[in-house]
Image: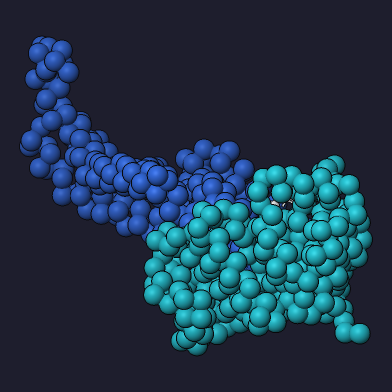
Amino acid sequence: MSVPKLEIESLSKAFESKVVLSDVDLKVDPHDVVCLIGSSGSGKSTLLKCINLLIPIDGGDIRLDGLSITSGEVNPNQVRQEMGIVFQAFNLFPHMKVIDNITLGPRKVHGEDRDVAEERARELLDQFNLSEKADDYPDRLSGGQQQRVAIVRALAHQPQLMLFDEVTSALDPELVAEVLNVIRGLKESGMTMLIATHEMGFARDVSDRVCFLDQGKILEQGPPNELFKNPQQPRTRQFLQRIVEAGRL
Amino acid sequence: MWVVLTSEAWPTVQRQFFSWFHFRESFPDVLSGFWLDIQMFLVAEVLILVFALVLAMIRSLRGPAFFPLRAIVVTYIDLIRGIPMLLLILLLGFGVPALQLSGVPTSRIFWGVAALVISYSAYTAEVYRAGIESVHESQRMSARSIGLTQVQALRFVIVPQAIRNVIPALLNGLVSLQKDVALVFVLGVREGLAEADIYNARTFNYTSYIAAAVLFLLISVPIARFTDWYTERDRRRRQAMST
Ligand SMILES: Nc1ncnc2c1ncn2[C@@H]1O[C@H](COP(=O)(O)OP(=O)(O)O)[C@@H](O)[C@H]1O
Ligand SMILES: [Mg+2]
């Protein structure tokens, strides 16, 4: 048995008195792709931000490669370098060219020389068919291109684990596929990923396991075929029913 | 205006305030004093822009570890903004040199400029802070997520965007400082206003004040026009971007 890449144990989080995550347990093995589904407000984004240590947790434990990252003994900046996170709204730095968006982390955090960082960034951009955008500012790019740059930026520090938070929700429908294909490519390369998504078809294709999050709890999880075909919980059935009615599965 | 120009008092007003003779007589001294104003203004402005930014950045740091630093900065800003600037100028300009401490400058120009920097920095820090808060939280999160520390996130991601948002406010501060440097006149520093005052005391003619006013206007009006031009251009650019 290998050590899980990511292991979450009875995680809880509240904003003021509002409980957003309660008693969440989740395990992601190396090279596994796990999708988080659930209605809006169920706590998907909060969970991902907790894992990336962008917001403090109230209770429980998060372990990366078997090492607790929430015990306060590790440097959060170092932990974040083991992971990449991509957000719904791209969040590129608008005052920097694409290339500088990507090299900022490697240069400032790892102290890489500009030449070295830029060379690697250009290789990555090339890999994602974005090489001709390197010297543009983000507002010159389409939404799909911006999101792909955001993925490249998150990959630039060579993370072991990628977190995706509804990365296609802000995109026009015809741009969704190009971003999803990038994620499929990452799966091929063996990347461990935790993906919050509303794209059920994609979740079914790409994931090894799907978790249904409801009111801050993981209500049900299992291989996509089982969970989508034969949900055990009434709430899961209800949720999937609504998705089917909306024509998204 | 028309009433003044047509009243019987006009010849007197003209002689007392707008005499070409007195203008020419007083101008060289007022000008050389004004040159000192400009120098103090430039030095003070650079120091204010840097110092205020440091204050604002400290105030924007999060987490309990930074609480003491934040508390110091908040106290500083509250205290300084609560004191009349003139009082601070008198206190430092006369008070500190009177202590005759060794190694401490005794120049009144030095302490006058120091008082301006201390006072203006408190206000300017609040301008920067408004700018920092106008940058969306998601930018901070993205910056942290690629491994940057809080200070690096501020420096490379938040502050450059923040400054762009507050350039008009900073330019307004520039105009106001350019006039307020003349306050060090109360310390007996022979800057432009002081020279005008000395001339007036000697001749009982007020034209020297007008000469000083003209010089201040020559600097502040162009900056004010530039501020308006910049603000308007920025507004149009943002509109174009949001459509
Ligand atoms: N910073 C915050 N302050 C207060 N409440 C928040 C904050 N962030 C999220 N929430 C609340 O937490 C709940 C879960 O939000 P979120 O994690 O964004 O859900 P999801 O991503 O599944 O839509 C929502 O009710 C939301 O209003
Ligand atoms: Mg969300």
**Quadrant in the picture for the N terminus of chain A:** bottom right
The one of A70 and B14 positioned closer to us in this rendering? A70
User: Residue B76, how many percent across, how many down?
Assistant: 62, 49
Residue B186 to residue B8: above or below: below
Image x and y of residue B217, in percent: 24, 41
Q: Is residue A46 left or right of residue A67?
A: left
Which image quadrant is residue A137 in?
bottom left
Q: Which chain is blue?
A: B
In the image, what residue occupies the spot 66% across and 80% down? Answer: A188
Q: Is residue B83 above or below residue A49?
A: above
User: Which chain is tinted cyan?
Assistant: A
Is B149 placed above or below A216 here? below
Compared across the picture, whether B47 is left or right of A218 comes to: left
Report the residue at 62% width, 43% height from top: B78
Q: Report x, y in % for residue B40.
A: 36, 55
What is the total number of numbered labels drawn onto the structure image? 0
The percent coordinates of residue B191 (x first, y second) are: 30, 49
Write the residue at 11% across / 43% down.
Answer: B25
Question: Is A72 placed above or below B33 here?
Answer: below
Position of the C terminus of chain A by quadrant: bottom right
Left or right: residue A198 versus residue B18 is right
Way the structure is coloured: by chain
